Amino acid sequence: MNINPIEQLLAAYAAFFPGAQIGSYVDGAILPGEGADIALINPATGQAFLSYQDAGERVVAAAARSALEGQRTWAALSHAERGRIMHAAGRLLRENIEPLAQLESISAGKPIRDCRGEALRVAEMFEYYAGWADKVYGNVIPVPSGHLSFTRREPCGVLLEITPWNAPLFTCGWNVAPAICMGNAVILKPSELTPLSSLAFASLIEKAGVPRGVLSVLAGYGHTTGQQALMNRAVKKVVFVGSPATGGKIAAAAAQRGIPCVLELGGKSANIVFEDANLERAAIGAQAAIFGNAGQSCVAGSRLLVQRSIYDRFVKMVADGAAQIKVGDPASATTDIGPIHNARQYQHVLDMIRTGLQEGAEVAEGCDGQPAESGYWVRPTVLKNVHNKMDVAQTEIFGPVVVAIPFDTEEDAIAIANDSDFGLAGAVWTADIGRAYRVASKVNAGTFWVNMYKVINVAAPFGGYDASGYGRSSGIEALHEYTQVKSVWVETAEKPVQAFGYAPSLDMAK
């Protein structure tokens, strides 16, 4: 019996919201929007299957009020109690991995196998930060006087977090967990194209005991609902995951309000392979680096730098492997990659492939830039004979397209790797541990792998250099992002010396 994927999606959504209404999640309930209609598209077919209304100003104002009240309640709890509630949320997320994965797979076009793994990672994020809730302290400072001087780490208050369509559930958990661990409330604005898993997530953590208002989810456009949320006075910090162009606009708007940002932006990461590497492992790693999630990953190893002595041989190995990757139905457990998520991104990927061919690149395997008959499908693509000044080597493609660039020496590889506006990630494959260390220390990247690629964990800090953004979104470093430091001074002297002023007469004081 064949199950209609849209019916399956609706059933999964109804498990969280029995009325199956789509809107914003505010104060424990779904609020319908009042703006323009927004269509949800099935990436596998390119056809609309649901629609809802943009949230609008009234819903944003309600979310801000709820967040202010929820944050006061949440911050008033003991750190240990917040930790217990976050542990409970982690357990409940584990119990709902399958419906969360179904929502993510169908609406985002991601293989169900990957979505199950990402849903599990979200549960682990809550478990990890639950353990940190009562372990972040201030410091006592040995000032050169008799004063007691100490610092407190206090919540920022209400945060606006804006997440993308390529990994909506994962980035939701990645950013919400450390934020609420420190006593903040979050107004989450997921991509208007993929709100469903974030809405379900919000309902689950409330069932675990997180107070209403600690997490609100706004379903709507960035230029309307997102902009209104950004300008709301309740918001004290902005966290954005997405494109550099949009991130720059958000940072500028936040600066006008005098509030800080954490930005995780794009990447054009260099995956460097030396002639002494284990080439079989490196070839598999190169495929994982770029083709997972159809290349729609900010850390994708989209520039494959290969030492010239092995260039032809290694590029053929990667191309032969790419030809065997299964592209197909996201619901199938055997599918390796699904479609590009949306029409705009699909057109960008095709345009970039055609640009590369016009610049002189050749297709070693995959797509030549021609569209599929239906849906947003792009086969895993390897472009060879690329040099680093080409547009395909400098512009983020955000699709299953890797460009193979030759280099001669270690210094050459480092120079090419750093010849980019971005600095999010990178990797080196070599048997020489000294070389591995040298390259890792000299390549400008927030995350760097040696003889591996694309392994991340909530315990390790993550973020970029240069145009890839600033701030860190995991590890203990994320907890520092989500607190503000207060310096407290206490007079301890029995008869303190005042540097200025006159003591009032006790008689006059009466």
Image (cartoon, grey):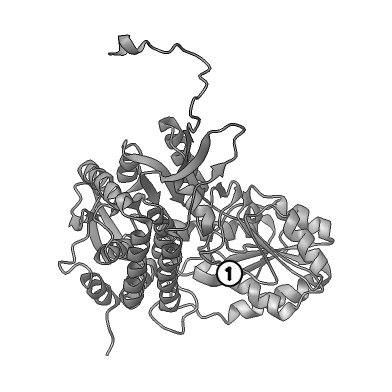
Residue 298 position, x and y percent, is 54, 59
Callout 1, which amino acid? Answer: Val
- Between residue 33 and residue 61, name the one nearer to us: 61
Indicate whether 223 appears above or below 10: above
Quadrant where the N terminus is found in the figure: bottom left
The residue that appears at 71% across and 81% down in the rendered structure is 280
Residue 332 position, x and y percent, is 40, 82
Residue 396 is left or right of residue 502, and the answer is right
User: Could one spot residue 158 in this view of the protein?
Assistant: yes
Indicate whether 194 appears above or below 98: above
- Between residue 377 and residue 190, name the one nearer to us: 190
Q: Find the residue positioned furthest to the bottom.
A: 1
Residue 464 is left or right of residue 407, and the answer is left
Query: Does dot 1 land on a helix, a strand or a loop?
Result: loop
Residue 17 position, x and y percent, is 20, 67
Residue 330 position, x and y percent, is 41, 76
The residue that appears at 20% across and 71% down in the rendered structure is 14
